[in-house]
Image (cartoon, helix red, strand yellow):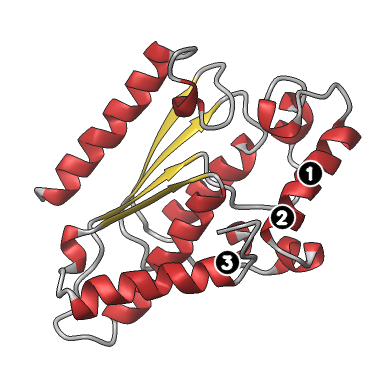
Amino acid sequence: LAPEAKFPEPLEWAIRAYDVVVTKMNICPSRIIIGGDSAGGGLACRSALHAHELSSVRKPMRRLAGLVLISPWVNHSCDSESHKENSHVDYLSGCSQSHDVSKEVMKSFTEAYCEDVHEALTDPHVSLLHMPSLVGLPPIMVTVGKKEVFRDDILLFCEKAMNDKVPVKTHVGESMPHIYHLLWPLFKIESDAALQQVADFCVQRLTA
């Protein structure tokens, strides 16, 4: 994973791992839920699109049970209103009062993930918000903090998925920053509520 291995290597490894599970271990996709947080959320989503591409050429066609995205990084641009509005409260961007400083912090993360910053901004395999179509994704569970810088991009991604007829369930943590679930001691009630939603979604999808 980044920064030791930069894009596209992490995606290639994720796809290989999925292919081994399905083709070598003979695990049915309908028994698999792919999940990830932050940059891993984008990786999980792209892997799920690959899973759809793979299943479409196999008979009978089997879809993934679901996709869980926790504060996914779906757009490497820092131009959304939530980036400007929340940069001073979301630890991810350095809690800076200056949006320019926040953008530099996020640029450093992008450089750690993908050598070419321009590619990260334009390649839909990195910034999934630019993917022409999300058709084929399984039902998605998304959690997002209302006070995180990625909020608007994530909600726009959810809207895009729903427009492509993908079932999406969204849980918004009030006054919460990026991946607040990891800060469980600080945000116990909010984290428990979000993780319960994720657990319920997984149970529902795997028993459908």
Q: What is the three-letter code of the residue carrying label 2?
A: Ala
| Figure check: 33 above or below 194 | below
Q: Are there few (<14), some (14-19), or many (20+) residues within 10 Å of tag 1? A: some
Residue at mark 2: 112
Q: Estimate the spatial distance between the alpha carbons at disc 2 and disc 1, rounded to whole Å.
A: 19 Å
Q: Which one is earlier in the sequence, the residue at label 2 or at label 1?
A: 1
Q: What is the three-letter code of the residue carrying label 1?
A: Asp
Q: Position of residue 186 (x, y in %)?
A: 49, 12
Q: Position of residue 54 (x, y in %)?
A: 32, 80
| Figure check: 88 above or below 136 | above
Q: Which one is earlier in the sequence, the residue at label 2 or at label 3?
A: 2
Q: Where is the N terminus found, in terms of image quarters?
A: bottom right
| Residue most extreme to the front | 4
Q: Are there few (<14), some (14-19), or many (20+) residues within 10 Å of tag 2? A: some
Residue at mark 1: 79
Point out the frontmost of discs 2 and 1.
Answer: 2
The residue at 67%/25% (across/down) is 90
Point out the frontmost of discs 2 and 3.
Answer: 2
Question: Secondary structure under badge 3?
Answer: loop
| Figure check: 103 above or below 6 | above
Residue at mark 3: 131
Locate residue 30 relative to residue 53 in the image: left or right.
left
